[in-house]
Image (spheres, rainbow, N blue to C red):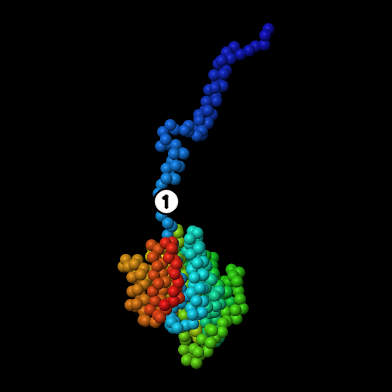
Amino acid sequence: MSPSVPSHPSKTFRRALLALAPLALLLAAAAPPAASPDPANRADVVLRSAEAAPAPAVPKWAIAIHGGAGTMPKDIPESEKQAYLGSLSKALTLGRDVLARGGTSLDAVEAVVRFLEDDPLFNAGKGAVYTHEGTHELDAAIMDGRTLACGSVAALKTVKNPIALARLVMEKSPHVFLVGDGAEAFATAMKVERVDPHYFDTPKRWQQLQEALKKEKEQKDRDTVGAVALDQHGNLAAATSTGGLTNKRFGRLGDVPVIGAGTYANNRTCAVSATGIGEEFIKHTVSHDISALMEYSGLTLQQAADRVIHQKLKPGDGGVIGVAHDGSIALVFNSEGMYRGAADANGRFEVAIW
Ligand code: ASP
């Protein structure tokens, strides 16, 4: 007898096919659709029409910087004038490059202020003015207009770049304002660069202290530094750094580290950095007042800054730099001059003193 064979091989085959059917359905669902004959549904056509779309507008960014406001005789030696303008140009270039390549406004303002802190021409970091006791006490603040996060440090004695520590207060601590020994301890914890206090010494500032001691009063020796910026992501930031006033005593603090006085940023309105007689800028909460005039009264940045600097402050008190959320820039002062610079995505690039 021949070995038994299935009596109905075709039936077995059909059963196998039926068992595989769910798998076939699954595979069909996962497979890419066949190219559609309708050109509107085809991926390659969609790509081509996207390429043909109008080019996006030039990305918007803007930056303004300052190196202090005050009495600046126009007859200063040409070499001194060029030294200030040259340093401002370099600082502005640093900030411009960060923004032009799509970096953040926070990185731009920190880079500018760090650079100016390292330059002995300015009253911030190296080259800071002397206290009554012949020491240096440094203040700085930074603010993020996107979140209103901020960081301030004051009365620092050994931190090479106070603005870097201010940023760490903002980003790595639950606080917004650290002062004196506590701020120094935070600097140790954050491992920021420290220097011997004499690092900040310069003969020019020592001379200024001797003159102030003779007159027996505090003296405003301008040259505080600051930067404000709008980045391509629409975020504003402000940063300011100073040695304060020559011959200051009793732990005196100025407006620079006081958020809303010397430093403020809010994406809804503007970013502002101030320079001048700190006590006046604190009394009038200058930088927040400019923002509030924009937010509540609908003024432009220029109108708001003009109102506060020329109508609320006294002539000679100082000035502000500001950038608004729309990229407009204001450079306003009621003193003889203000070291300043401005640049934006439309090719503006300028530095000036008077
Ligand atoms: N505003 C600073 C202060 O009072 C000084 C300055 O701007 O030069 O500490």
Whole-percent x, y for residue 292 in the image? 36, 69
Residue 148 seen by the camera: no
Q: Residue at x 63, y 12 (%)?
A: 5
Mark 1 secondary-structure assignment: loop
Whole-percent x, y for residue 254 in the image? 46, 79
Above or below, 260 against 71 in this view is above
Quadrant assignment, res 314: bottom left
Quadrant assignment, res 351: bottom left
Judge: label 1 CB < 8 Å from ligand 1.
no
For mark 1, what is the residue?
Answer: 55
Above or below, 219 against 272 in this view is below
From the image, which quarter does the C terminus lie in?
A: bottom left
Whole-percent x, y for residue 110 in the image? 51, 68
Residue 22 left/right relative to 283: right
Above or below, 353 against 170 in this view is below
Neighbor class of circle 1 (other Cα within 10 Å; few <14, some 14-19, many 20+) is few
For the residue pair 130 and 97, the one nearer the viewer reads as 97
Q: Which residue is drawn at 53% across and 84% down?
A: 205
Q: As drawn, which residue projects farthest toward the front?
A: 78
Q: Which residue is drawn at 51% across and 33% down?
A: 31
Whole-percent x, y for residue 311 in the image? 33, 77
Q: What residue type is labelled 1?
A: Ala
Q: As drawn, which residue projects farthest toward the left?
A: 297
Q: Number of numbered discs present?
A: 1
Q: As drawn, which residue projects farthest toward the bottom?
A: 214
